[in-house]
Structures are given as structure tokens and as C-alpha cells.
Image (cartoon, grey):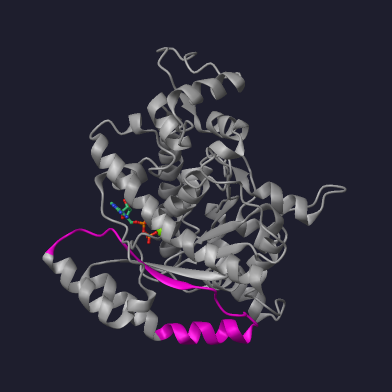
């Protein structure tokens, strides 16, 4: 092929791809209008930790009719659940609402591994939805999708791009205009979109965010950008009063997007699925990582509060046990003790762009036990991260 034929071929690929994506997105949207997670009466009283009679009383007080649905079965959705919980006296609440003090900083956790397919996106979605729904402290949780592939955004803001919402790339590259009287802070706050979980918001990625790496290279090359790692951190500074915890999902690469995520973060979680390939790749990555840190430190990052490895997609087998043992030999202080187990329910939820915390049990008709086990395991995985966060806040408070 000569020059112009090559250009034409690339254009053909682009055209085919654009049309494919358009159709796929329409189909996904049609099948995937997400509903709020709903709870049966038994599930609701377990969730709130009160007996069914007490539940009934507060559901009435909240002026909710749990049998108004077509099938007239008792059910309330997650938003209604939060209203009911809001009416409970302190003595009946599982936990009191968390109020972050001035000394306690927003925890920004980057989920990173240069290897693809290790569970970064599934972990980010599960941990964020877990922190937002399963802990009655009512943490205000933010998600940022730094991966231009925008998978995480399809979970929680599937219509953002079509509706012209700003993406994280738009904010970083400054590709928007302020309306009269509008502040950057307002624009940033509005870009964190509400989700089907009452206290979880997401700053989505858009396909156009793929242009970000090129944009950075050009700016850095022409000396128009003095500190190319701090753009995301500046964005987060604008909304830190609105969130207690922010999780950042990253692309499987070490470009400017990932460096910005690392620079903005106060802690790091490395997901690692336990196969020989993934461990090899991750070890090569860890061999290189001091050089990443040197650049971040040079840009005045103050250091991380915690750094942990989260084993993901874990299947029980003798090979896995052997691999785990060798991981413990070398990385013991960094390994979370609860691994994120492989589960058909997690796989199914992720293919529906949901997690076990924003799906209703009735949406997983196959096996209630499988779903419940996955939910329990995801809760344990999330709890160990919550414990690390609480430790950081405790230390900050006592300083
Ligand atoms: N605990 C799990 N159980 C079952 N499948 C999982 C689990 N974790 C991840 N997966 C599957 O592995 C695939 C890759 O995960 P993903 O989070 O997209 O990886 P990454 O973001 O690192 O590329 C997903 O399609 C998901 O279905
Ligand atoms: Mg991913």
C-alpha cells in the first residue's frame, strides 16, 4: 500500500469502528437502564439492623408505600432506604453518620497496575459502591475514570457522553467554556454526576479522552505546561469538601493520565490476579516503580498513607496456593489478607455493568447463595480498605 492507500485504510477502520460503537452503545443503553437496587422486607431489616416491625413503623413515617409496585410485593429501593435510615434515632442506627473534621483529609485512592485485565475496573466499582452503600457512616464517595476506554463510566454514567456531560479529560485539557458568572469550582462539582447510588458520584471518561496523551506530549514539548502531573490533583482540590473518599480507576499504561492519578492520590491499591503471567508482569512493573515515584517525588508529592496489593479473581486451587505462598514470601506486609474471589456473580454483574452492591438480589436469579457469597466477600474486601482509611483519619486527627 502506498501512503494514500494506508490513509484510506485507516479511515475505513475508523468508520467501521465508529458505527460498531454507536450500535453497541445503543444496545447497551436499551438493555441497561439501571434501576435502583431494591430490597425485600427481610433484606431491608437486615440491611438496617432492625426488626421487621420497627422497619414497618419507619417506612410509614417516611410516607413510603412499599406495596405500590405492580406485583404488590413489599420492596423499597436504595434511595428510600436512605430516607428510612435518616429517620432512625441514633440508638437504632448501625453506625453514626461520619463527619470528617478539618484535620482529616479526603482520601484519594488510585487503583493501578500496568497489566490489563487484573481487575482494576471491577475492584474500583465494587469498592466504591461498597463504601457508599454498606457502611452506615454514609461516606460521600467519588469515582474518577482515568481510562479513556471509559468502561467504569459505562457502569455509572452510561449516558454522559451522549448528553454532552464534561469528562475528566475535558476538565484536564480545559476544553469547555465557563458560562457567565460560573466558577471553575461549580463546573468541576457538576461534572461529578449522580449515580444509582445516593452518595456515589462519578467523574466520567469520554472516548475523546484518548486524545489526552497526545495533548500532554504537545504541551510539554512546547513548554506550555510546567507541571504536567498536577492537573488532576488541582481538579480534586476543587471538590474536596464534597467527598470523603475518591477512587481513581486507571488505564493499563504509564502515561500522563496514570501519572496524574498517582500524583493526586494519597494511597495506592494494586490489584493483582493470581496467574503466573500476571504475577510476572506485575513484578516487572514493581521493578520499575521506584522510577515512577522519583518523578512524583520530584514534583513534590508528599508520600502515600498506605500502599496495598489486592489479590483479585482468586480461584481456589493448588496452583493458586503455591503462587500465593511465593507472593507472601516477598510481599507479605503489602498484601491484603482477604482476596477478591473469582465468582460467577461478579462476572455476571460486571457484564451487566453493575456490582453486587448496586444490583438487586432478584436480578441474579441463578443462585442466591452464589450472589450472597460474592456480596459477603466483596464486603470483606471493602472493609479492609475502610480500616486503612480509618487508620489514616485517626492519625490525622491525633496529629
Ligand atoms: N472477582 C472476579 N470474579 C469473576 N470475574 C472477574 C473478577 N474480577 C474480574 N473479573 C473479570 O475479569 C475481567 C477483567 O477485569 P477488569 O476489572 O476489567 O480488569 P482491568 O480493569 O484491570 O483491565 C472482567 O471482564 C471481569 O468480568
Ligand atoms: Mg479497566
**Which quadrant of the frame does ligand 2 lie within?**
bottom left
| 94 in magenta | no
Residue 325, image x and y in percent?
21, 75
* Residue 270 image offset from top left, x and y in percent: 41, 69
Residue drawn 70% across and 81% down?
223
- Is residue 151 placed above or below 308 in the rendered structure? above
Question: Considering only vertical position in the picture, is 373 above or below 172?
Answer: above
Q: Would residue 50 appear left or right of 189 to someone viewing this image?
A: left
Which residue is nearer to you in this view: 165 or 97?
97
Q: Residue extending furthest right?
A: 181
- In the shown orientation, is residue 49 left or right of residue 239? left
Looking at this view, name the residue that lies furthest to the front. 91
Closer to the camera, 265 or 114? 265
Residue 250 appearing in the image: no
Q: Residue at x 27, y 30 (%)?
A: 365
Which stretch is magenta? 288-317
Please give the name of the residue rendered at 57% of the width and 70% of the height, measured from the top-left corner. Answer: 266
Q: Residue 217: where, in percent of width, then height?
A: 59, 75
For the C terminus, the image quarter is bottom right
Front in this rendered view, residue 270 or 145 = 270
- 28 w.r.t. 114: above or below: above
Between 159 and 322, which is closer to the camera in this rendering? 322
Q: Quadrant of residue 168?
A: bottom right
Query: What residue is at 17 percent from the left and 59 percent from the top?
Result: 316
Magenta stretch: residue 297 in it?
yes
From the viewer's perspective, tell me whether residue 322 is left or right of residue 352. Answer: left
- Figure label count: 0
Outermost residue to the left: 318
Locate the N terminus by quadrant. bottom left
Residue 71 visible from this viewpoint? yes
Amino acid at each position: 500500500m502506498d501512503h494514500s492507500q494506508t490513509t484510506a485504510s485507516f479511515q475505513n477502520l475508523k468508520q467501521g469502528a465508529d458505527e460498531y460503537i454507536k450500535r453497541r452503545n445503543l444496545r447497551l443503553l436499551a438493555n441497561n437502564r439501571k434501576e435502583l437496587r431494591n430490597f425485600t422486607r427481610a433484606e431491608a431489616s437486615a440491611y438496617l439492623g432492625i426488626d421487621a416491625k420497627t422497619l414497618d413503623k419507619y417506612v410509614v413515617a417516611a410516607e413510603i408505600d412499599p406495596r405500590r409496585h405492580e406485583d404488590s410485593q413489599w420492596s423499597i429501593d436504595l434511595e428510600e432506604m436512605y430516607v428510612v435510615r435518616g429517620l432512625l434515632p441514633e440508638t437504632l442506627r448501625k453506625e453514626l453518620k461520619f463527619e470528617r473534621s478539618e484535620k482529616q483529609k479526603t482520601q484519594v485512592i488510585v487503583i493501578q497496575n500496568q497489566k490489563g485485565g487484573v481487575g482494576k475496573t471491577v475492584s474500583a466499582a465494587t469498592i466504591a459502591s461498597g463504601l457508599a452503600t454498606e457502611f452506615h457512616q454514609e461516606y460521600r464517595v467519588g469515582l474518577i475514570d482515568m481510562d479513556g476506554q471509559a468502561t467504569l463510566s459505562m457502569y455509572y454514567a452510561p449516558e454522559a457522553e451522549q448528553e454532552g456531560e464534561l469528562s475528566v479529560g475535558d476538565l484536564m485539557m480545559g476544553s469547555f467554556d465557563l458560562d457567565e458568572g460560573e466558577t471553575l469550582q461549580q463546573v468541576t462539582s457538576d461534572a461529578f454526576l449522580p449515580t444509582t447510588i445516593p452518595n456515589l458520584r462519578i467523574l466520567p471518561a469520554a472516548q475523546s479522552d484518548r486524545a489526552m496523551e497526545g495533548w500532554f506530549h504537545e504541551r510539554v514539548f512546547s513548554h506550555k505546561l510546567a507541571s504536567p502531573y498536577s492537573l488532576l490533583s488541582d481538579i480534586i482540590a476543587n471538590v474536596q469538601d464534597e467527598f470523603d473518599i475518591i477512587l481513581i480507576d486507571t488505564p493499563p499504561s504509564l502515561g500522563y493520565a496514570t501519572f496524574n492519578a498517582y500524583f493526586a492520590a494519597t494511597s495506592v491499591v494494586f490489584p493483582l490476579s493470581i496467574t503466573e503471567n500476571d504475577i510476572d508482569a506485575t513484578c516487572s512493573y514493581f521493578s520499575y516503580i521506584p522510577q515512577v515515584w522519583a518523578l512524583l517525588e520530584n514534583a513534590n508529592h508528599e508520600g502515600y498513607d498506605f500502599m496495598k496489593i489486592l489479590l483479585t479473581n482468586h480461584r481456589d486451587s493448588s496452583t493458586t496456593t503455591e503462587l500465593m505462598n511465593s507472593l507472601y514470601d516477598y510481599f507479605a506486609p503489602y498484601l491484603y489478607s482477604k482476596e477478591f474471589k473469582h465468582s460467577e456473580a461478579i462476572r455476571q454483574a460486571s457484564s451487566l455493568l453493575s456490582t453486587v452492591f448496586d444490583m438487586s438480589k432478584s436480578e441474579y436469579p441463578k443462585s442466591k447463595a452464589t450472589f450472597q457469597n460474592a456480596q459477603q466477600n466483596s464486603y470483606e474486601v471493602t472493609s479492609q480498605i475502610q480500616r486503612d482509611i480509618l487508620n489514616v483519619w485517626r492519625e490525622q486527627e491525633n496529629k
